[in-house]
Image (cartoon, rainbow, N blue to C red):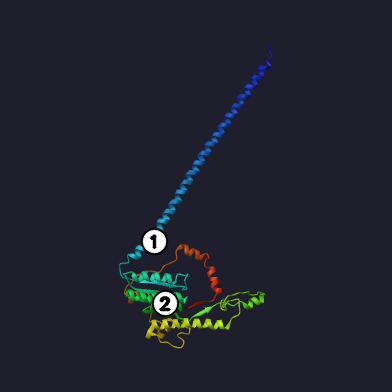
Amino acid sequence: MSTPENPFEAAASAQAGSSSSASVAASSTADSWNRVAEQFARDYLKDRRSERRWRIFFRLVWIAAIIAVVWAFVAQRNLAASASGPHTALIEVRGEIAADTEASAENLVAALKSAFEDPGARAVVLRFNSPGGSPVQAGIVNDEILRLKVLHKKKVYAVVEDTCASGAYYIAVAADEIYADKASIVGSIGVLMDGFGFTGTMEKAGVERRLLTAGDNKGMLDPFSPLNEKQVAYAQGMIDQIHAQFIAVVKQGRGTRLKATPETFSGLFWNGEQAVGLGLVDHLGNLDYVAREVVKAEDIIDYTPHENLAERLARRFGTSIGAGAMRALQGSVNLR
């Protein structure tokens, strides 16, 4: 007959078994956490390596882009500087002639100076595709061409592509000879001051214009106020004077070649073939013809300054919209 187990021994044995199970469970949990920590560390190091690789890659891309831009700039400068052979210097006059455009006096004068100062340039050719613009900007360019011609003893030729009208023709008459295609548009020797009047619209909309000025003519030609005949007469006299200045420049530039008629300075324009007959253009021809047959230097190097990428993006995204709106609201004098 077996002896009954001591209850204290049984309890101790049960407690020992429970402690052993808890120890095994704790050890298993610790091993699991260690495995998780090791996996996390491996993943973290992997991500860091990947991140570091991408960071290095993008840095290399930026360095390569900067090197490419610098190389292109230096190459362009060297190309312009190494134009040792005889060549025809080209300057483009495109679009509106105004202070904030590519055809501004600042840009064109800088290009003219570079072209005239280059010893390899046999002559300077201005290629036109412009409807005109500011008489001030056109006058500055015209004066600079005349000055540089005397200083450097080089010929200047104007070549018309599609259009050389008004302010563009103001510049072109500074050239020694003007060439155009038979279908080119040439002329429009006149001045305009344009704007809008909103007085009738405001009355219909029930809007009252409240304008306070110090000076009788401070609100002159205000688009929201009725026209003042005295101010209109003054403005007309001013643009008539600018027109007379324009006519004098044309007569001086064209000299005896000009066959003036009553319509020559009326603001009319003609095609290239008609312009030759009127003495507004000397010959029919294009850029290649002038470089090959007149200048005798077929190599053509463009000295025209162009917008950089930032300026192009800024213009594309409309930073000049405000200026355009203001020009639409305010009357401005233009040769176009």
To which quarter of the image does residue 6 belong?
top right
Q: Residue 317's x, y, as percent?
A: 52, 64
Helix, strand or loop at disc 2? helix
Circles 2, 1 touching at the beta carbon (< 8 Å):
no
Label 1 crowd (10 A; few <14 / some 14-19 / many >=20): few
Residue lying farthest to the bottom in this orientation: 262
Q: Which mark is residue 171?
A: 2
Three-letter amino acid code at the position of disc 1: Phe
Residue sitting at x 36%, y 63%: 77
Q: Residue 132's x, y, as percent?
A: 46, 76
Residue sitting at x 41%, y 59%: 69
Of the two numbered discs 2 and 1 in the rendering, the one whose residue sits closer to the viewer: 2
| Quadrant position of the N terminus in the picture | top right
Residue lying farthest to the front in this orientation: 214
Earlier residue among tags 2 and 1: 1
Helix, strand or loop at disc 1? helix
Nearest the camera: 25 or 116? 116
Q: Residue 265's x, y, as percent?
A: 46, 84
Three-letter amino acid code at the position of disc 2: Ile
Q: Which mark is residue 225?
A: none
To which quarter of the image does residue 64 belong?
bottom left
Q: How many marks?
A: 2
Residue 174 lies left or right of residue 86; in this view the side is right
Q: Is residue 326 visible?
A: yes
Q: Is residue 289 visible?
A: no
Whole-angstrom CA distance, mark 2 to mark 1, is 30 Å
Q: Which residue is mark 1?
A: 73
Residue sitting at x 64%, y 76%: 202
